[in-house]
Amino acid sequence: MRGRIERVRTAWREMKALLREDIELQAQWPRTFGLIRADRPAWFTFVYLLFAIHMFPAVVLYRVQVFFYEAGFPRLATVVSRLNSFLFDVTIGNHVRAGGGLIIAHGHVVLDGWTTIGRRVEINPFVTLGISNSSRKPFELWGPEIGDDVNIGTGAKIVGRVKIGERVKIGANAVVISDIPPFHTAVGVPARAIPGGRRRETERWEPPKA
């Protein structure tokens, strides 16, 4: 019993820490445009994002799903996963793990297999990350490993046990079946890597002046 309680507490702390990073990243734009004051408490920012940012609830449900699974309630985790799929068309398997600052831009997203996602990763619509069942690769339950600060373009597919380096850009509709080194862009079917990934943002984004 004591072990179960400690497991729940550990999962709860982990969920709160990751959600805090999600909130901070997604609150940047509303704060930039003056929709949220910087001195607002965390609970206010959370509620604002929950009702004003289209896909933020999908990220919250995913965090709750992982909490239930890590706390030892896999059936509840599966129920939350089904709810996310029904409400937001975001289907995420129980073995997918993502770092803080996760952004799911819109729906029609499938994340499955033993997939790991780094911090500050943006996933656009119609993206699939998961297992491979192609003739070129043997079937296995391992999905891709996505590095930090990766942008995955609309319609992209990353399948199989491949590694995507940090600050990589995955082009729209690219099909990635092999590793992509850091600071590269992946384009094509099958995708090839070309130098030039996401630039390192050293300053806070500012809207253009009129």
Image (cartoon, helix red, strand yellow):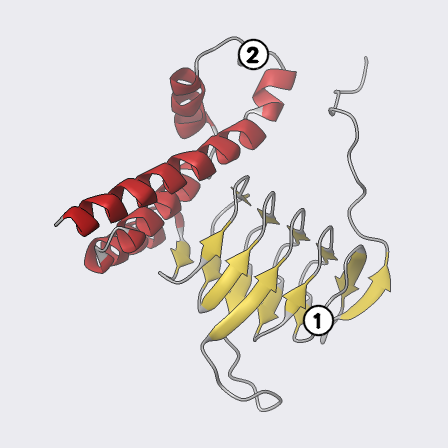
Mark earlier in primary sequence (2, 1) = 2
Give me the disc on residue 38. 2
> At 81% from the left edge and 14% from the top edge, which residue is drawn?
209
Within the image, what quadrant is residue 175 found in? bottom right
Q: Amino acid at mark 2?
A: Ala
Q: Residues within 10 Å of mark 1 (few under 14, many from 20)?
A: some
Q: Which residue is at 77% across, 58% downward?
A: 182
Q: Secondary structure at mark 1?
A: loop
Say what amino acid the circle numbered 1 marks: Asp
Residue 179 got which mark? Answer: 1
SS type, badge 2: loop
Q: Residue at x 80, y 20 (%)?
A: 208
191 above or below 36? below
Query: Is residue 108 visible to us here?
Result: no
Residue at image location 35% in from the left, 60% down from the top:
94
- Can residue 96 be seen here? The reply is yes
x and y percentages locating residue 178 in the rendered image: 69, 75
Q: Is residue 191 above or below residue 51?
A: below
- Near-viewer residue (75 or 72): 72
- Residue situated in front as seen by the camera: 105 or 137: 137
The image shows residue 198 at horizontal and vertical percentages of 77, 47
